[in-house]
């Protein structure tokens, strides 16, 4: 009966994550997101953000740490955790022509964590994998060009952590990556003739992250934990096309 209730709760929460997916990515406003797939996410939740984005060795029965799936095994056996994060960012850019300040943000992540046994914890969530958002212009020979981009890649993950022996925790995240990235270039000549170059990327692929943590007690009240993660390298699958 407990397993049935846990399964129903998990399916309902997972459905909520999927419904929230279009809005669960903060708006990026950095010119550096023009390159590649955009600004990479770090899987950090509010707890890790308060420590400067560190957290590979963090484990707690009352906090969700999506940075290292091995931490899921530390969840309290009577706890169900649900965490939503909102991001607000202020960007200031300066160049030879002056300075500009922009604000970005939105729903950053949605995660949950619950136990299935005394040694196994399961987590699911939606976190940003990359974010793209920029708009700037530059002078070219006999004209002017403007660049703008938007979109990003979402990461919908399901992970589990287990404690095979005391002090050692192992875990894995299996993620579904999806999203669209749009990069536009508008060139305008000095006589008023304009041309638009648009590149679209549609990403749909999977992603794996493995994690391990080991805790060593050095006294009755103190312990030391080491954590490590590994992500196999692979090319992202999707479609890219250009509109001119």
Image (tube, rainbow, N blue to C red):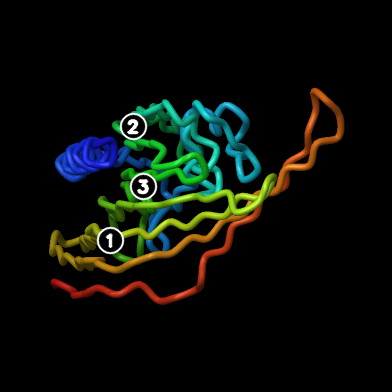
The answer to whether residue 96 of the structure is visible from this angle is no
Q: Are marks 2 and 3 in contact (CB under 8 Å)?
A: no
- Residue 21 placement (x, y as % from top left): 21, 44
Name the mark nearer the viewer: 1 or 3: 3
Q: Residue at x 14, y 63 (%)?
A: 194
Q: Residue at x 16, y 65 (%)?
A: 196
Which quadrant holds residue 117? top left
Q: Secondary structure at mark 3?
A: strand
Residue position for label 1: 143
Q: Are marks 1 and 3 in contact (CB under 8 Å)?
A: no
Q: Is residue 2 left or right of residue 212?
A: left
Q: For the view shown, which residue lies furthest in the right direction? A: 219
Observer-nearest residue: 202 or 59?
Answer: 59
Quadrant including the N terminus: top left
Name the mark nearer the viewer: 2 or 1: 2
Residue position for label 2: 105
Residue position for label 3: 128
């Amino acid at each position: 009966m407990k397993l049935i209730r846990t399964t129903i709760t998990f399916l309902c929460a997972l459905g909520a994550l999927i419904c929230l997916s279009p809005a669960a990515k903060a708006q990026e406003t950095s010119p550096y997101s023009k390159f590649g797939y955009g600004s990479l996410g770090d899987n950090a939740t509010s707890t890790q953000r308060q420590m400067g984005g560190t957290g590979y060795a963090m484990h707690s029965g009352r906090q969700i740490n999506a940075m290292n799936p091995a931490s899921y095994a530390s969840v309290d056996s009577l706890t169900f955790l649900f965490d939503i994060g909102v991001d607000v960012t202020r960007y200031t850019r300066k160049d030879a022509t002056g300075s500009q300040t922009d604000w970005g943000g939105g729903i950053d992540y949605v995660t949950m964590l619950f136990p299935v046994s005394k040694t196994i914890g399961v987590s699911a969530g939606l976190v940003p994998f990359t974010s793209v958002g920029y708009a700037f212009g530059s002078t070219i020979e006999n004209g002017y060009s403007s660049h703008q981009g938007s979109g990003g890649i979402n990461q919908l993950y399901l992970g589990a952590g287990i404690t095979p022996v005391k002090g050692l925790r192992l875990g894995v995240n299996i993620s579904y990556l999806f999203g669209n990235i749009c990069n536009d270039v508008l060139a305008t000549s000095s006589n008023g003739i304009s041309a638009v170059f648009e590149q679209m990327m549609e990403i749909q692929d999977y992603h794996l992250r493995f994690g391990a943590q080991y805790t060593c007690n050095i006294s009755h009240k103190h312990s030391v934990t080491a954590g490590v993660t590994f992500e196999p390298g692979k090319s992202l699958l999707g479609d890219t096309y250009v509109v001119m």
